[in-house]
Image (tube, rainbow, N blue to C red):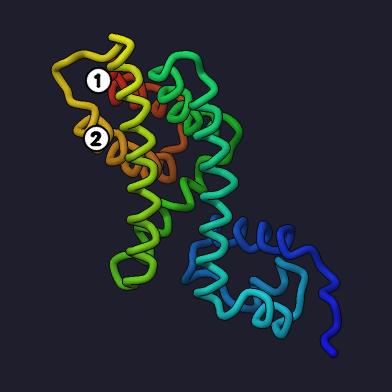
Amino acid sequence: MARPKAFDQTEVLDRAMDLFWRQGYEATSIQNLVDHMGINRGSMYETFGDKHALFQRALNRYLDRVIAEKLEAALAASDPLQGLRTFFEDFAEQAERGEAWRGCFLVNAIVELSPRCERMRSCTREAMDRLEGFFRERLQAAAARGELSVRHEPVALARYLACFLQGLAVHVKSRPDPQAIRESLRVGLAILA
């Protein structure tokens, strides 16, 4: 009979997510993971599978927890365009808190693994498609309220915002200066005016 697990899987997965987010996939060894997660190798493999499977679950946890929280905050705004601005302004707030060097776990995964791993490329593409869909829905809501210029279609603007998000997420890792990030946001989001 198998022993019951003596650890909280969600808490341990959050620790793995944190480590992968900080170090990336390649720079994180199995030993780093078990040390940081506070479990032994056997428990890690039994519960989460191999390193790649654990990374995939950590990325999904990031999407379900961190990104979902940002999307909920954007949805809570009474003005769809202000909600989108709030979503992006979180990057400047990360820099002010000293957390910008981590960037966005999703974009980190796109840059590091998508070029050479079809499973990761598919997963990250699906996540970016969901984000782009969210942007499109918010832009369509703003257009319906007469708050969006007719010079740009919501579909094209949503694609632009998805590209801007990826560029901004990489930029904050190399230049985590809140003022520079706010300047980039001001220019990049001016298209929503």
Residue tagged 1: 191
Residue drawn at (72%, 67%) of the image? 37
Residue for point 33% across, 48% down: 129
Residue 191 position by quadrant = top left
Q: Is 93 located above or below residue 81 in the figure?
A: below
Please tell me in which quadrant of the rendered image residue 165 appears: top left
> Which x, y percent locates residue 25?
49, 68
The disc at residue 137 is none
| Residue toward you, 52 or 134 | 134
Q: Label 2, secondary structure: give it.
A: helix
Q: Is residue 184 above or below residue 64?
A: above
- Disc 1 packing (10 Å; few <14; some 14–19; many ≥20): some
Q: Position of residue 16 (x, y in %)?
A: 63, 63
Q: Is residue 138 left or right of residue 39?
A: left
Name the kind of residue labelled 1 in the image.
Answer: Ile
Question: Residue type at mark 2?
Answer: Tyr
Is residue 168 or residue 158 the one in the foreground?
A: 158
Q: Earlier in the sequence, mark 1 or mark 2?
A: 2
Task: For the N terminus, give its image quadrant.
Answer: bottom right
Q: Residue at x 55, y 28 (%)?
A: 73
The local crowd at label 2, few if under 14, some if 14 to 19, many if 20 or more residues have their Cα within 10 Å, is some
Asked whether the residues under the numbered discs 1 and 2 touch, taking CB atoms below 8 Å apart as contact, a structural biologist would say: yes
Tell me the distance, in whole angstroms, between the alpha carbons under discs 1 and 2: 10 Å
Quickly name the residue at label 2: 160
Residue 145 horizontal side relative to residue 13, left or right: left
Residue sitting nearer the eye, 159 or 51: 159
Residue 110 place in picture, x, y as percent: 36, 58
